[in-house]
Image (spheres, grey):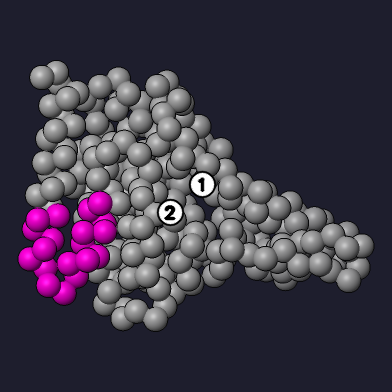
Amino acid sequence: MGPGTWRKAYGALKDSTKVGLANFNSEYKDLDIAIVKATNHVECPPKERYLRKILFATSANRPRSDVGYSICTLARRLSKTKNWIVALKTLIVIHRLLREGDGTFKEDFLNYSYRGTILQIPQFKDDSSPLAWDCSVWVRTYASYLDERVECFRILKYDVEADRLVKLPQASGKAHSRTRTLPCGDLLDHLPALQRLLLRLISCQPEGAACTNYLVQYALALVLKESFKIYCSINDGIINLVDVFRYAKI
């Protein structure tokens, strides 16, 4: 049995063991199993049926204790694993929850994360193969982007990706983000946060063997989907700022 085959077998054994242990947790058994199966060692994106269970467990109509348990379980999964597949799939689950979950989840995640404890994993490294090494680099970069995304939400008080473009009466039918009409004081706080987020997004460029890996490409697609809204928010904010100074009394 080669090293790669042995590693896959060992990963499958760990997953089945965790599922078995989850069966003893009578209160959160289904949620534990869904998290383990969504973030298992199989090199493919998390299955939708498990993601849906996690999304339901973190929805607004669920007890806040359930949401807290979900966040803590995902954080523990991310901090303890040495496998790039498990780490990346855990980050994908968190990203999907941030994108598709309601506002209360984002608030709860912010309260539990205390910037620098959940999504900052600068020491993460899987050196089991050249692919694992290259993917580990991208996992760290992806985690940094998500961390900046949460920090941006803290400053803006809204999710830029979920922000709906609106048409202004004087804008000839063109839709704009909310930064187009923000007061100058708020704008000076929001623009630097959005620019930092954009820089993190730009750095999410895989290298080496990670470039052609399907799981990395799946996560990268989630990141790229957010680039348009971030760019629009920055662009509209700059136009707003220029207008403020243009019409300001000197």
Q: Amino acid at mark 1?
A: Leu
- Name the residue rendered at 46%, 46% in the picture: 145
The residue depicted at 22 percent of the width and 53 percent of the height is: 36
Under circle 1, the secondary element is helix
Task: Work out which quarter of the rendered image holds the C terminus and state it.
Answer: bottom right
Quadrant containing the N terminus in the rendered view: top left
In the depicted view, which residue is nearer to us: 3 or 144? Answer: 3
Is residue 192 something that shows in the picture?
Answer: no
- Left/right placement of residue 3 relative to residue 169 reads left
The range drawn in magenta is 19-37
Work out how far the residue at label 1 is from the one at label 2, CA to CA, in angstroms. Answer: 8 Å
On screen, residue 10 versus residue 31, left or right, reads: left
**Closer-to-camera residue (192/173):** 173
The residue that disc 2 covers is: 95
Q: Is residue 29 left or right of residue 94?
A: left
Residue at point 54%, 49% (across, down): 197
Mark 2 secondary-structure assignment: helix
Give the quarter of the image for residue 110: bottom left
